[in-house]
Image (spheres, rainbow, N blue to C red):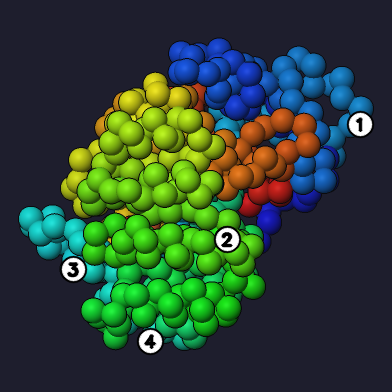
Amino acid sequence: MSAPSTSSGIQLITNIGELTTNVGPSTGSGIHPEDRGGTIPDAAVLIEDGRIAWVGPSTSAGTHSRPADEVMDAGGRAVIPGFVDSHSHLVFGGDRAAEFEARMAGQKYAAGGIRSTVAATRAATDDELRARLRGFLDEMLAQGTTTVEIKSGYGLDVATEERLVRLAAEVTDEVTFLGAHVVPAEYADRADDYVDLVIGEMLDACAPHAKWIDVFCETGAFTVPQSRRVLEAGIARGLMPRVHASQLGPGEGVQLAVELGAASVDHGTYLTDDDVAALAASDTVLTLLPGVEFSTRQPYPDARRLIDAGVTVALACDTNPGSSFTSSMPFCIAVAVREMGMTTAEAVWAATAGGAAALRRDDVGVIAPGKRADLVLLDAPTRVHLAYRPGVPLVAGVWKDGVRR
Ligand code: NIG
Ligand code: FE
C-alpha cells in the first residue's frame, strides 16, 4: 500500500453533495426490492480513530461532541463507502495476453488455461509474487477498493499453495484457499487423487493462513462430489465455504453451496430457476463478476432476475490473468448497469455492502457510526456518474481506516 498522505486525527468532511450510507432509503431513484443504498444529500461525516463517529446533514456538522483537527470541504461531490472486492486471484506469475487475444479472435474460454499460469507461478520467487501483489493492491486502492479477498489456486502443489496463501495473508484478512482450482497436469486422469492431496497435506499447510475454502465446481474442473469433499474438509478445519459455480454452464454447484451454507457462490452466469429459488431462500450471496463475461465474451447474467427474486447480489472484479484482468470496481459497476439490468444504486450497493455480505463482514460497506472509515470521494455530484461516465477516473480520494491514501 502507498504511504498515508494525511494524519488520522479527528477529521470532518463537509459539503458532500450526495453521501451513500447504504443505510435507510435512497433519496434518488429508489432501490428494489428493499430500500438499500440509502443516501443523504448535503451531508457531512466525522472520522475518529479510524472509524465513522458521526454522519448527518452538513448544516448539523458543528453539533458533534469534539472539534475536528482537520476539515475538508468536498465541494458538493459524492462520497460512497470503499468498495469491498470479495473475489480476486492476485498472487500469480506471468500473464495470458496471447490467450485473451486469441479469444477476441474467436477462441472459447476454457478452465484449462489456468494451468499455464500455474507454471509461471511455480517459477516465480516470493519477492516477485509479493511485488506483483502489492502493485495490484495499489492499483485497486487508487480505484476505491478498500477491502479485498484474495484466493490461492495457481500453485496446485503443497509448497506453492502454501506460499500463495502466506503471501496473501501479508496483505488481507480475507484469504481463501483454492487448491481445488483445477487438476494440475501431473494429476491428469487422477482427479480423485489430487482431491486427496488438497484435503490432506495441502489443507494442513494452507489452513493456518486462510479464512475461507473455495472450489471451482464446473465441467473441466471439479465434479459436485469432489467439490463436496473439498468444502467439507475445509469446514471441518474451521474454514468457511465459498464456491465458484455455473460459470461455463449450468450445474449443481449453486445447490451445493446453498446446502453447505456458503457465504457466497460466485459467477452464476448460467442459473436455473431452481438455483435462483434456492439462493433467494438462503443466506448465500450470489457474487456477479461482470469482468468475466466482458473478457470471455460470454452472455451477461441477468441481475434484475436475481434481485427481483430476492437474491442478495454482490459485484466483484475477479482480477486474474485468465478470465478477467480488470481491477476496477467502477468498470464492473458500469458494465453491470449497462449489461445486467442493475440500477447504479443497486450496483454500488452490490460493490460495497453486497461485497461485505459475501464476506460476512458488518464493519465495512456501510457509512454509519462505529463502522470502519473506508470512504471514496468521487469527482462527480452523484454515484450515478460511475456508470454514466464509464472509463473516466472519477475516484478523487480514498480513506482506508480513516487515513487518506
Ligand atoms: O474465477 N473460474 C475459475 N477461476 C478464475 C479463472 C482463472 C483463470 O482463468 O486463470 C475465475 O474466473
Ligand atoms: Fe475466480
Badge number at residue 66: 1
Q: Which of 82 and 162 is in front in this view?
A: 162
Q: In which quarter of the image is the N terminus?
A: bottom right
Residue 181 left/right relative to 2: left
Give coordinates of residue 396: x percent, y percent: 54, 40
Percent across and percent down for residue 216 are: 36, 60
Counting residues from the N terminus, which is met first, the one under dot 1 or under dot 4?
1
Q: Do the residues labelled 3 and 1 touch (CB within 8 Å)?
A: no
Residue at image coords 55%, 17%? 35
Tell me the SS state at disc 4.
Answer: helix
x, y percent for residue 18: 58, 22
Residue beneath label 4, please?
123
Residue under pointer 3: 98
> Mark 3 vs mark 1: which is more N-terminal?
1
Secondary structure found at label 2 = helix
Is the residue 7 above or below the residue 184 in the image? Answer: above
User: What is the C-alpha distance between the residues marked 4 and 3?
Assistant: 19 Å
Q: Name the residue under label 2.
A: 235
Camera-nearest residue between 88 and 236? 236
Q: How far apart are marks 3 and 1 (CA)?
A: 57 Å
**Disc with the residue nearer the chain's start (2 vs 4):** 4
Disc 1, SS: loop
What amino acid is found at the position of numbered circle 4 in the picture?
Answer: Ala
